[in-house]
Image: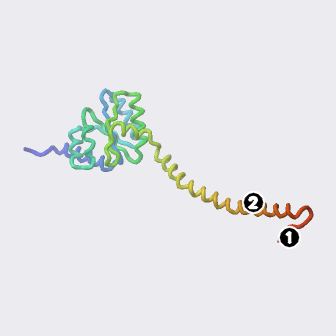
Amino acid sequence: MAGPRPEKVAVVEQVRAHLDSSDAAILTEYRGLKVGDLASLRRQLRSAGADYKIFKNTLVRRATEGTEQAGIVPFLEGPTAIAFVRDDVGPVAKVLRDFAKAHPGLVVKGGLLGTKTLDAQGAGALADLPTREVLLAQVAGAFAAPMRQFAGLLQALPRNFAYGLSALVEDKNAEAGPGEPVAAVAAED
């Protein structure tokens, strides 16, 4: 019996290469979508940082056999396309969610975030994540808040000291009475 055909081996290697080089993968069912709709979706996903590819389920199973990505095997039923995500998964998930609203034939089945398998709900939740830039800004703000608070405390120390001295001088002036210098009152104590 002959081994697998070279073209199938090449596709399996291509799937492995895509999975290994991607930060995430989102699996979808595209039943009922027209070729023009798929082309439009591919363009939108490419601009969001993903490649949208269709492979035979059996070849994807072979590519993931014995790897950390084998968790996607249960999603390989029916017509399946995979969005291979580079960098930020949020914008890609948003494109898929918005496209699925307009085209009910597109269904998110699940996905892979690093080596963690996500179900359809988890993959859909990625669309609600803020962008990478917003998350970095939030982290920077969280780091900056204690420093701002510390700077405010350092600024308050001399200010409160000055208010205390001012109150003490006013107290001494009130004890001295009108026209009497503060130094004279201090000398009496």
Asked if residue 59 is positioned above or below residue 172 in the image, the reply reads above
- Quadrant in which the N terminus is drawn: top left
Task: Give, as a three-letter code, the residue at label 2.
Answer: Tyr
Task: Give, as a three-letter code, the residue at label 1.
Answer: Ala
In the picture, measured across the screen, residue 110 lies left or right of residue 65, that is: right
Graded by Cα atoms within 10 Å as few (under 14), some (14 to 19) or many (20 or more), the crowding at tag 1 reads few
In the picture, measured across the screen, residue 168 lies left or right of residue 32, that is: right
Q: Where does the image place residue 135, in percent across and percent down from the top left?
A: 48, 48
| Residue at mark 2 | 163
Q: Which of 137 and 81 is in front in this view?
A: 137
Question: Please, which residue is most extreme toward the front here?
Answer: 189
**Who comes first in sequence, dot 2 or dot 1?**
2
Q: Where does the image place residue 178, in percent across and percent down from the top left?
A: 91, 61
Disc 2 to disc 1, C-alpha distance:
20 Å
| Residue at mark 1 | 183
Q: Which of marks 2 and 1 is in front?
A: 1
Q: Determine the residue positioned at 27% across, 49% down.
A: 68
Q: Determine the residue positioned at 67% across, 59% down.
A: 156
- Quadrant in which the C terminus is drawn: bottom right
Contact (CB < 8 A) between labels 2 and 1?
A: no
Question: Please, which residue is most extreme toward the right here?
Answer: 179
